[in-house]
Amino acid sequence: MNRIDLHTHTNFSDGSFSPTDLVELANKQGLDSLAITDHDTTDGLSEALEASKDLSLELIPGIELSAQFQNREMHILGYFINLTDPKFQTRLETLRSTRMESIRHILNRLHTLGIEILLSEVEQAGGTGTIGRPHIAQVLIAKGHVQGLKEAFERFLGVRGKAYVQRAVPEAQEIISWIIDAGGIPVLAHPYWEGLNKEDSIAACQTLAEQGLQGLEVFYGTFSASQISFNLGLARRLDLLMTGGSDFHGTLKPDIALGKGRGSLHVPPKVMERLRQATGRQNVNHSNPRS
Ligand SMILES: [Zn+2]
Ligand SMILES: [Zn+2]
């Protein structure tokens, strides 16, 4: 059996597992291919590559970046990026500093709502990694302001929450070009065409493809069969690669299991074949010796 999960987070961003523990879990569960796609950082990948060195598990270096496109925020995954590309790393540093700015804004909003949370408390929750809203949520829970993650996002941190701050992120075209510049394959994460009819979603996706997008995350941890078939049709129509993953975050998204999502995730082996072929076509010099 071939088992693939190309979308996971470690404690270098908002997951709860260390890269080593995640690799070990994936190996124990019999996964053949695992991509680690932390937000705005590739810093966990050297540890993960080291941990997977003597395993049959194939570790694919990845990342997940936020982007703006037609007034909505979307996430773009990058696979097989060259981790030592200095320009890419500088670009990631810029992203991380704007991320910190938005965290400060959120804490200010919470302050005006009478909730005192220090940046240092959020940083402590985030450990060594990129900090994000889930870490603010953890502090909100620890201080008794909310019962759980869901309430933290509904009341405060989510788009409709009282302390929501929209983070300024680069345009999709820019993010796509950063990934390509670093030798990677840009793939639209969890494509969800909220508010768009079929024709408009096709047009939007076509524009992204013209900007250099090479794939769609057709198979996703929480997608229904109809969402999968819609994105499958879109990928076929626009001749885009298909990828798939759970978006595993460990205990920070307890309903999502590694390799399984909510239970029915299945990423076909063909996905990996095509992804490898694509890197071959591009002649990518990536850091995983076994793929
Ligand atoms: Zn995402
Ligand atoms: Zn993700």
Image (cartoon, rainbow, N blue to C red):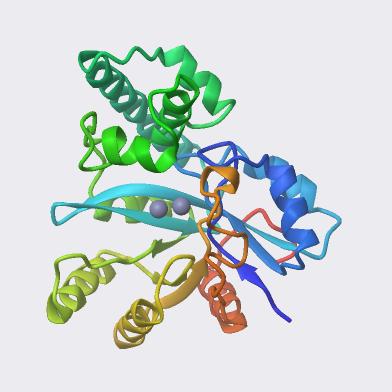
Q: Nearer the viewer, residue 209 or 35?
A: 35
Residue 163 higher or lower than 248, as above or below: above
Residue drawn at (24%, 28%), measured in percent from left and top? 163
Relative height, residue 130 to residue 277 (above, below): above
Q: Nearer the viewer, residue 175 or 231?
A: 231
In the rendered view, does 194 fall on the left or right side of 217?
A: left
Is residue 82 shown above or below 55? Answer: above
The quarter of the rendered structure image containing the C terminus is bottom right
Q: Can residue 132 be seen?
A: yes
From the viewer's side, name the closer residue of 132 and 100. 132
- Specify the quadrant that holds the N terminus: bottom right
Q: Quadrant of residue 17?
A: top right
Q: Residue at coordinates 33% horizontally, 25% vertically from top-left?
A: 103
Q: Is there any visible trace of residue 180 in the rendered image?
A: no
Q: Residue at x 59, y 37 (%)?
A: 11
Q: Position of residue 175 (x, y in %)?
A: 33, 50
> Which residue is outermost to the right?
54
Looking at the image, how many numbered discs can be counted on the residues? 0
Please provide percent x and percent y for residue 60: 62, 59
| 161 displayed left or right of 78 | left
Residue 67: x and y, percent?
28, 49
Q: Nearer the viewer, residue 74 or 144?
A: 144
Q: Position of residue 114 (x, y in %)?
A: 25, 13
Judge from the rendering whether residue 89 lies leftward or rightward of residue 107; answer left or right. right
Where is residue 194, by image quadrant?
Answer: bottom left
Q: Residue at x 44, y 36 (%)?
A: 134
Q: Quadrant of residue 42?
A: top right
